[in-house]
Amino acid sequence: MTPTASETPDRLPAACPACSPDAETVHEVLSSGGGDLTVRCSDCSHVHKIQPERTRERSLDVIVSQDGESFSANVTTPAEETIEVGDEFLVETEEVLSTVRVTSLEGEGEKRFDSAVAEDVETVWSREIDNVSVDVTVHPQDGSRDDSRSVTVHVPGDYDFTVGESEGFGDDEFTVDAIVVREDATGYWTTRFEQDGDAVAAKDAKRVYAYDDTSSAWSAW
Ligand SMILES: [Zn+2]
C-alpha cells in the first residue's frame, strides 16, 4: 500500500460558472490551499474556486499481531490499490511504528481473500516483522525424538537461519537441520528447506528444526 500522493496540475478542465456552467473549459490553477483550488477560466478569465478531484480513499482496520498480543490501527489507502497476503507496509500509531506483513484480508461477511482491491477489504490481518519470535524444535543428538523440546527465540525479522549452521541463544545451542516457511512468505521456491546452506529470514520462518549442541554425544539417526 502506498500513501496517496496529492499532486496539483498547472491546468485542469473545469466547468466555469461565468461562461460555461455545463461544459468544461481549460482553467489555470492560481493557488491551492484550504482544500480548494483557485482557478482562472482560460476562455473568460473568471476566477473562482473549485474542489480538487481527489483519489478515492479507503480507510482500513489493520489488526497487527505482535508476539502473541494484538493491536488495531487505521490505515488509509487508495481505493483501487490491490492488497495481497505477503504485502509489507508501515503502520504508524501514537504508540507504535512497525513494519507489518499482511497475513489475511477480510471483506464483508467475514469473507477472506488472498488478494483484493482495497475497497473490497474491511479488515487487514497482519503481523509485525521488525522483530519476531520463531519456534525451534530441538532434537537431542542421541536420537530420542521423544525428548525433543521446543524453544522460542526472539530475533530481528531479517535475521537469517541457515541449515547446517550453529546458533546460540542464551543457554541454548543448536545446529539448524530444517526450516519450514510461513504461508505468508513470498519468494521461496519450496516450503521446507533442509540442504546445508539454505537460508530463511526469521520473519519468513514458521518453525526451525535443529539438533541439540548442548549435549556432547553424537550419533546419526
Ligand atoms: Zn469562463
Image: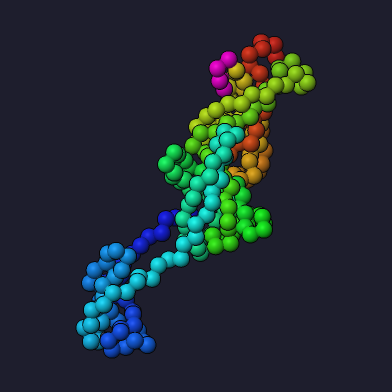
Based on the displayed image, in which of its 4 quarters is residue 39 positioned? bottom left
Q: Residue at x 38, y 71 (%)?
A: 53
- Image height check: is 142 above or below 26? above
Image check: 29 left or right of 208? left
Pick the residue in front: 70 or 55.
Answer: 70
On the image, the x and y values in percent for residue 149 come to: 70, 21
**Residue 220, position as x, y percentages in the image:** 74, 19
Could you say where residue 115 lies in the image, as x and y percent from the top left?
60, 57
Please state the extent of the stretch shown in magenta in the rendering. Answer: 167-171
- Residue at 23 percent across and 87 percent down: it is 44
Residue 12 shown left or right of residue 157 in the figure: left
State whether residue 69 appears in this view: yes
Image color mode? rainbow
Left or right: 16 with respect to 179?
left
What kind of secondary structure does the magenta stretch mostly adopt? Answer: strand
Residue 107 lies in magenta, yes or no? no
Residue at (32% x, 65% y) in the render: 35
